[in-house]
Amino acid sequence: MRAAVGVTCFGVCELRAALRGAGPSSDVGSTPAPPLPSCEAPPPPRRPSFEALLRDQDIDPVVLWVFAFCRAVDLARAAAACRAWRRLVAEACAPRGAFPLDIRLLELAASKVACHLAATQSELHASPAGSRLLRFGGVSYDEHAELALPVRIRLPGARSLSLTLDTRVGIGVRCISCGQGHSLLVTLGGDAYAWGDNGQGELGLCLPGGGIDRDPRWMPTRICARAGSWEQSAAGDAFSFLRDAAGAVCSFGDAANGCLGRPSGAAVAPVPGIAAADVAAGNGHGVVATLRGELVTWGGGYAGQLGFGGRGNSATPLKVTPKGETVWHVAAGDLHTVALCVSGSVYHFGERSNDDNLAPTQLRGLWPAGSRVARVIGLPQTSVAITDTGDAYLLGSEMRKLPLCRVRDLTMFESSVVAVCEDGLHVLSEELDSLIQGGSLETVFIGRER
């Protein structure tokens, strides 16, 4: 897995600029991009400098962008978020005091490690918390070809991931989310941007006369509705959600099977009666953890992913909170839902390979005693739980611990699980389908020297 490094002089300058946080100006705004945060933890011994990587002619080309990305991951921020999560869980589990429950749940949801990775079918997106967006994918930028740095990750069995780094997008990112063919991001300033497919209006863009703009966009385009108020995004198959600072959830895009949670028509409009601390989108359904700690779902439910005990769709939000639990974090796959409670319990409902869970079912005995789940991440066929120690567990029909340590974030790209860990980037050697069916748990390590 060794190859000669070859980049154009212009591409080198652009990547160096990305490492310094300067970068070229963005098409979506004239405000200079904030500098990339540097790791506050001491660097590992013999860690090569960027200049040394450029001089080394016997190193994988992918190390160039992986080095740039891993160097920018703010591990101190992640550790602080984990400590805040533990403190807030302890407070929420204690008798209610001067702080109302809804404020605690908002703080709890906000303490999750910021999203670093998200992927559509053709693009992988990465962003260290609070920093610029890095895009990797097969999209062709003919008029700006010199801005792209092609790389290839070779995997066992003649498999590979082909990526192209584009450093033009200089937006300070709060979170990223991706559907099948479109992407959303929310900036630190509360603005929302969208790009990709738009045949159903899933980008939330409006025409000058007020109609729904259905033209695709290949660069992040600002969503004008409620600009400056957004805190979180979630993307489904051909629909999207945005949550504002007050907890209101707005939906837009394809209304099939009731996945918008409201009557269709308006480009961007709120889901009635929802005040959310967290929101997620599956292939055709939506799920929120409300400010009161309730679990609410709507949309397509033929695999039981709505959790009301049966199979069927609902265009009206349904409360399906597990008895005696307070839900603060949710995730969704194509046909399943996962909820994380203040008590530390994790509930699953929807599709499983052996049998579907039609109502919230608690997952037990997977992680060691004393460990708590800090985050759940929805993948198409399954979900992954990340504990407060950074271990990752696959929540499939056979729940298994993944061979990853100190995980910061992960996603699926081109059927492979890609994870950012404290020591660099890992790609699971087996495709996700094989992992779910009991395939080999091995990883390909890419990035920093161990």
Image (cartoon, helix red, strand yellow):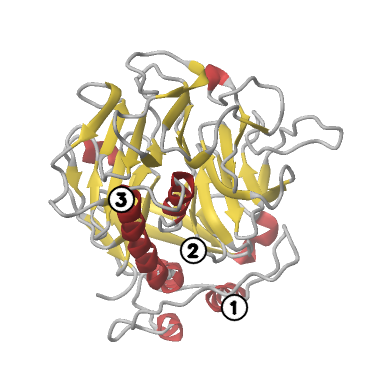
Residue 158 visible in image:
no
Q: Quadrant of residue 146?
A: bottom right
- Please state the horizontal and vertical placement of residue 405, each as a whole percent of the image: 23, 61
SS label for mark 1 = helix
Query: Which residue is denoted by mark 1 in the rendering?
Result: 13
Q: Nearer the viewer, mark 3 or mark 2?
A: 3
Which circle marks residue 129 in the picture? 2
Q: On screen, 78 above or below 280?
A: below
Q: Residue at x 72, y 57 (%)?
A: 28
Q: Quick one: label 2, few (<14), some, or many (20+) residues within 10 Å? A: many
First in sequence, mark 3 or 2: give its number.
3
Tell me if 263 is positioned left or right of 403 in this view.
right
Q: CA distance from mark 1 to mark 3?
A: 53 Å
Could you tell me which quadrant the N terminus lies in?
bottom left
Q: Residue at x 15, y 43 (%)?
A: 366
SS label for mark 2 = loop
Q: Amino acid at mark 3?
A: Ala
Q: Amino acid at mark 2?
A: Ala
- Please state the horizontal and vertical placement of residue 69, each as a whole percent of the image: 45, 68
Residue 266 visible in image:
yes
Q: Residue at x 35, y 79 (%)?
A: 41
Q: Quadrant of residue 226?
A: top right
Q: CA distance from mark 1 to mark 2?
A: 23 Å
First in sequence, mark 1 or 3: give its number.
1
Find the residue positioned furthest to the right.
209
Disc 1 and disc 3 in contact, CB within 8 angstroms: no
